[in-house]
Image (tube, grey):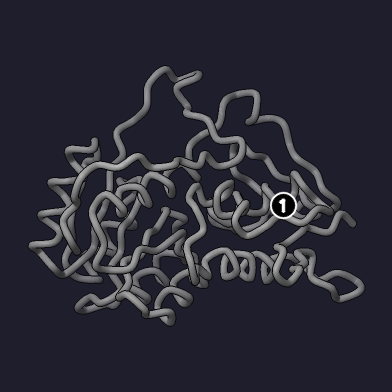
Amino acid sequence: MGKGGRRRAVRCYIPVGCFFCCCFFGVVAINRLLLIDDDTELCAMLAEYLEKEGFDTHAEHDGESGLRAALSGRYSILVLDMMLPRLNGIEVLRKLREHSQLPVLMLTARGDDVDCIMGLELGADDYVAKPCAPRKLLARIKAVLRRVEPRCLDALNTPLQVGPLRLWPGRRQAEWDGKRLDITATEFNLLEVLARRAGNIVSRHELSGLALGRPLERFDRSIDVHLSNIRQKLPPRADLRPWIQSVRGMGYFLLRE
């Protein structure tokens, strides 16, 4: 991973309906970050960089000890390398998702689409290809964390209803016909964007900016994989059409009924 150069202005996307919890708590907690990577020099460099940006960072260097730490409940986000001793990153993610919805940002080899797609299918929130500049990693970490920020009190108790789908944006809870949907924070954000514009096409660029909190990159498949995951979690329609429809070259929309 290369060292960062000069600071540049970065366009920030704020996910739909997302506000800092300080509007009623008055303070924002320090984010505790877990980094699982067997490259100890890289971990030390990243920890130093991230701590200067306000993160309390802890590193583990193999999959087994990393998984134990990830399941401890002490961390706000996990940065997970795919190539690990004892337990690889895919297995760590698979076992983690059986018990926890901790936000996960994957570190993948550049050009390795298999790891990217498999990780996203297993519930990772996003990925960064190695090597990359620390400032890009930081921007992606912040984008993932914005997706899980608590909302203000007025959003906590106001559900959003579209047909059998009911969303509580403040609590990031989703129900289908009264039964809770088990979805990640990223999946919730995508579903919320589509629900607020139900029946209307939302482009992949808009979905990336509003739901992922970042611009859509060239050859980026994350939106498509996340929406495929959501489709699999929604019950089938009587006419067998998926509730989330895709329009080639334009985007996606959620059917109203």
In this view, the residue in front, 200 or 218, is 218
Residue 87, percent from left and from top: 27, 77
Left or right relative to 37: residue 44:
left
Instruction: Determine crowd level at label 1: few under 14, some 14-19, many 20+ residues with C-alpha closer than 10 A.
Output: many
Left or right relative to 13: residue 190:
right
The number of callouts visible is 1
Left or right relative to 48: residue 232:
right
Label 1 sits on residue: 194
Left or right relative to 132: residue 44:
left
> Considering only vertical position in the picture, is 100 above or below 209?
below
In this view, the residue in front, 19 or 4, is 4
Q: Which residue is found at the position 57% from the left and 63% from the top?
A: 223
In this view, the residue in front, 86 or 103, is 103
> Considering only vertical position in the picture, is 228 above or below 184?
below
Quarter of the picture containing the N terminus is bottom left
Residue 182, percent from left and from top: 60, 58
Residue 121, percent from left and from top: 52, 72
> Considering only vertical position in the picture, is 110 above or below 40?
below
The amino acid marked with disc number 1 is Leu
Residue 80, percent from left and from top: 30, 64
Q: Which residue is found at the position 18% from the left and 61% from the top?
A: 2
Q: Secondary structure at mark 1?
A: helix
| Quarter of the figure with residue 248 | bottom right
Q: Which residue is found at the position 84% from the left and 54% from the top?
A: 199
> Considering only vertical position in the picture, is 136 above or below 119?
above
Q: Which residue is found at the position 70% from the left and 69% from the top?
A: 249
Quarter of the picture containing the C terminus is bottom right
